Amino acid sequence: MKKIESGPNGGYIIPHPITLISAYDKDGKANAYAQCWIMNIGHKPPKIALITREKRYTYSLFKESGFFGVNIPSIDLVKEVDFFGRNSGKDLDKFEATNFTVFKGTKANVPLISECHANFECKVIDKHIIEEDMFILFAEVLNSHFNEDLYTKDGKFDETKLQMMVYGYNHYWGVSERIGSVGMSQK
């Protein structure tokens, strides 16, 4: 098959899984932002890595504590995820605006989003700058929470029920169908 050369800007591996990264501010108010540059990097204990920026408001909330939540939304939350990604917690309460509810982590002081079907409590273990204000953050997963409807009647986890959302080039996708576009919550 003939290839089309697209230069370095075409060098993104897509799609990316979409998550909501959450943390409390100093007054105990929850905030979160949409994050798609995230990956598993270890398993004893589980570890993840994510790419973020120093200027992210939510990062400023967990920079000192070293703890944050990872929340995995299902495809039916695409508008809310877009809203979390297109707005800053410095300017408004995203939880109030979306009617999302918070439950507190049991191993770390992190807000977790009830409406998401999977949640992870994470502890920062390392950080490396990759360019200007962008860095890779390494974290250990301290605890995980999954909705009970993700399990079969005999108690086995059924990952086909996750209905994860992924991000491509300015679009949100389910397993094989586009489910939204960047900015759709602004219309």
Image (tube, grey):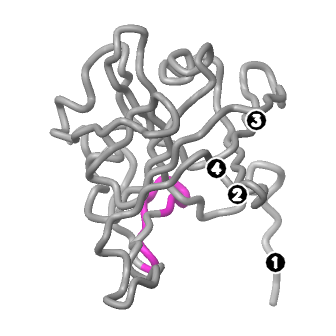
Residue under label 1, please give it.
3
Q: Earlier in the sequence, mark 3 or mark 2?
A: 2
Pinpoint residue 46: horizontal percent, then vertical percent: 70, 55
Residue under label 4, please give it.
38
Residue type at the position of mark 2: Asn
Q: Is residue 24 left or right of residue 68?
A: left
Is residue 187 rendered magenta in the image?
no
Q: Earlier in the sequence, mark 1 or mark 2?
A: 1
Q: Work out whether residue 63 or residue 35 is closer to the camera in this orientation and state it.
A: 63
Residue type at the position of mark 3: Ile
Q: Which mark is residue 40?
A: 2
Q: Which mark is residue 136?
A: 3
Q: Secondary structure at mark 1?
A: loop
Instruction: Tell me the CA gap for discs 1 and 2.
Output: 30 Å
Q: Image point 78% across, 71% down: which residue?
A: 4
Q: Secondary structure at mark 3?
A: strand
